[in-house]
Amino acid sequence: MELERIDSVPASYPMIGGESPHSYSKNSSHQGRLIEASKDLINEAIEVNLDIETTCLSGTIGIADLGCSVGQNTFVAVQNVIEAIKNKYLSNSQNSQSLEFQVLFNDHSSNDFNTLFRSLPPSHKYYAAGVPGSFYHGLFPKSSIHFVHCSYALHWMPQVPKQVLDRKPSTWDKNNIHYLNASGELHDAYSAQFNNGMESFLNARAEELAIGGLMVIVMPGVPNKSILSEIAPAMSFGFFESCLAEMVKQEYISQEKVNSFYIPHYYPTSEEFEALIMQNGNFSIERMGVLNKRMSNIALSIEMAVGTVRAAMDVLFKEQFGDEATDQLYERYAMKVAENFHLFESKIREHEDLFVILKRRKN
Amino acid sequence: MELERIDSVPASYPMIGGESPHSYSKNSSHQGRLIEASKDLINEAIEVNLDIETTCLSGTIGIADLGCSVGQNTFVAVQNVIEAIKNKYLSNSQNSQSLEFQVLFNDHSSNDFNTLFRSLPPSHKYYAAGVPGSFYHGLFPKSSIHFVHCSYALHWMPQVPKQVLDRKPSTWDKNNIHYLNASGELHDAYSAQFNNGMESFLNARAEELAIGGLMVIVMPGVPNKSILSEIAPAMSFGFFESCLAEMVKQEYISQEKVNSFYIPHYYPTSEEFEALIMQNGNFSIERMGVLNKRMSNIALSIEMAVGTVRAAMDVLFKEQFGDEATDQLYERYAMKVAENFHLFESKIREHEDLFVILKRRKN
C-alpha cells in the first residue's frame, strides 16, 4: 500500500504555560496535539467511510476510547467523533430520529476512573461509562460499538516477551532496556510479541465493532527502512540505558535490577502494521499515513522532554527501582538530554506517528 | 393492593467478626443481608415474570445496579441475577445461543469507582462498566437494559426540599434534622420532594428498560398506619437531634449549623409507594412486600448501630459540622444508643424494608 503523508497539523501550537513539570496538562500536550492533528482526518473518515444508515439504525451509537487515561484529551476526542457522526446523519434531510450516544471510556482497572468521571464535561450530551480492563481482551458485547478511537496506547504491549525475561543477560547487551538499541534477537522477540498482541487486539475489536464500523488508531511508529538506533526513541532509551549503567557502577542500583527491566513498548513501521492487519483479515484499511509535521512548529524544552517520558513511564520505573533511584534517574536523564539537546530535538522533529483508519469487514 | 409479607430470610446470619467499627464489611452487613434475603425472591421473579425470549433475543442482556457503592454486595447481587436469567433461558432446550451480559454499575461520580473496579471478582463472566451519575436522571441508552437492581439507595432523595431549606427555623422545631420527629408540615415537604424524585426516577427507567424488563427495588419503608415518631429511624434521628442540641448548648457548634442541616432520606409506606408507581403508569407491580424477618435472628450491638449509621452518613455530617464535631457527635450518639439499647433494639427488630418487583409495561 502506498503510504500517504498527512500534513494536516495547523501551523502553530502555543505551549500551555504556568504548570509544574509533572502536571498532566504539560505532559499530555503531545497526545493532545495528536488529537487535534487527527480531528480533520477523523471527520473525513466518518464523512467518507462510515455507513451512516446502518450505524444509526437503532438510534443508539456506541463509541469507545481505548486507553483513555485521564484528562481532557479523551473528552475532546470523543466529542469530535460525535459531532462528525451527527453532521453526517443530519446532512441527509430524510433523517430525523434523535440519536443517542453511549461513550465507553476504557483503560486498565488501575487507571484513575474517579478523576476521569469527576472531570467529565458538565455539558456532555452522551451516556458515559467507564470500562476497566485490557484492550487485548474483549471489553464490550458483540457488535455493540460503531466507532473505536485508540490514540497513543497500542505501543504498550500486553507484556514484555517471555523469552526476553527468561534470557541469560550475557547473551544480549546487559544494559539494554528496550530493543531499539539492542541486537536483532531482542527486536525479533519484541516484534513477535507485538504481532501476537495485535492479533488479540484485532480479534477482540472484530467481535465488538458492528459491520461497517470504524476504528481509528494513532500510535508512534518508525519510518520504513530507517536505522532503528538512529530514531528519537532510541536516543531517549539510550540516555536511560547509560544513566542506569552509571547508577550500577556507582552502586545506587544492582546490575540484576537492570538486567530484568524492559520497557514494553513497540514502534512498528507502517509496512509491518499493514501486514498485521491484512493477515488478521477482519478489517479493511481505509486510510493509512503518518502525522509527520506534528512537532515541526512547537517549542521543545528539556523539561518537556523529561516530563512527557516521566508521565508515561513513572510507574514502570518506580516498580523496578523504587522512588528514590527513579527520581535520580530522571535527574541524570535530564542532564543527558541537556548535553545532547540539539541532536535530540532534531530527531524528535523527525519522529513519525502512524494514523490508520480501519473498517470492520462483512464476515 | 394486598401487601404480602415475605418471610424468606434464612434463620441465622453470623456476624462477621474481627474488623474495625468503621470498616466496610461490618457496616454494609445490613445491606448484604438484604441482598441475601432478596435472592430467592429475585430468582422467582425472573422465573415467573421475565419475558425470557424477548430479553435474550439479541444475545446481549443489560443489567444495571443503581447506587452500587463499593464492595462485594453489588457483585453478589448481579451474579444472582445473571445465574437466574441463564437458568431460565437454558431451561428451554430450544435455546442454544450463548448469552452475553453487560453489567452497568451506577453510582454518583463521587463514588469510589477505582476501588469498585479493582475489586471486581477475577472470575466474573460479564462485561463490566461503571456509570457515574444520579439515577434521578437518564443513565443508559433507550431500551438497553433488561434488569434493574436498586437496593438501599432510593431513600436518598435527590436533595433536601427547597421549602425546607428556605424556611424560617422558628416555624418548625429548630432542632429537627429530619421529618420523622417533626411537624406534619416538614413531612409534607419531604413527601412532595420524594414524589417528584420518584417520578423522575421511574420516567428515566421507563426509557431505559426494554419492554418486559424487570426492576427490583429494596428500600427502607415504614409500616402502613404506623406512628412515625415511634419507629426505629425516628428514634435514631431523635438521638442525633438531642446530641446536636446539647452540642449547641455547650457551644461546640452553632444553632445556625443545626438549623440548616437536614438528612435527605425518605421512608415511604408501601401504600404510598404503590400509589406513586400506579400514578406514573409505566410499570406494572408484579410483587410487593416487606422483608420483615430480616433482623430477627442476628445479634445487635451498639457498635453495629453506630457503624451502620456512620458508614452511610459520615460525608453528610462532616460537610456540615466538620470532622471534629462529627466525631464527637458519634460518641454522644453511641452513649444515647447504649442508654436506650433495649428499646432501640426492639424497634430495630420491627423495622421493615420494602421489596418491589416492577415490570416495564408495553407503551
Image: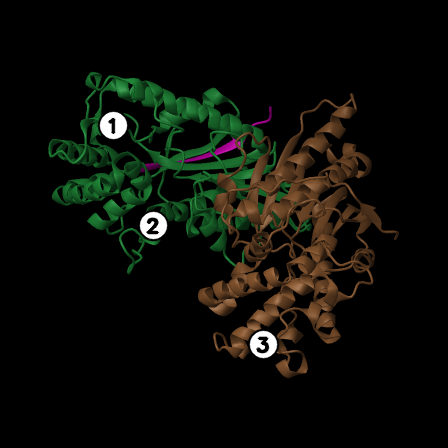
Chain colours: A green, B brown
Structural crowding at the residue carrying mark 3, measured as other residues with C-alpha within 10 Å and reported as few (<14), some (14–19) or many (≥20): some
Q: Are marks 2 and 1 in contact (CB under 8 Å)?
A: no
Q: Chain of mark 3?
A: B
Residue numbers of the magenta segment: A352-363
Residue A234 percent across, percent down from the top left? 23, 32
Q: Amino acid at mark 1?
A: Leu
Q: Amino acid at mark 3?
A: Asn
Residue A183 percent across, percent down from the top left? 22, 20
> Which residue in the protein does label 1 denote?
A180
Q: Chain of mark 2?
A: A
B202 sits left or right of A68 in the view: right
Q: Is residue B4 above or below residue B96?
A: below
> Which residue in the protein does label 2 denote?
A29
Secondary structure, magenta segment, majority class: strand
A83 sits left or right of A36 in the view: right
Front position in the image: B334 or B320: B334
Q: Is residue B43 magenta?
A: no
> Which residue in the protein does label 3 denote?
B259
Q: Is residue A358 magenta?
A: yes
Q: Is residue B234 above or below residue B73?
A: below
Structural crowding at the residue carrying mark 2, measured as other residues with C-alpha within 10 Å and reported as few (<14), some (14–19) or many (≥20): some
Q: Are marks 3 and 1 on the same chain?
A: no
Q: Are marks 3 and 2 on the same chain?
A: no
Q: Amino acid at mark 2?
A: Ser
State the residue at coordinates (22%, 26%): A256
Front position in the image: B157 or A262: B157
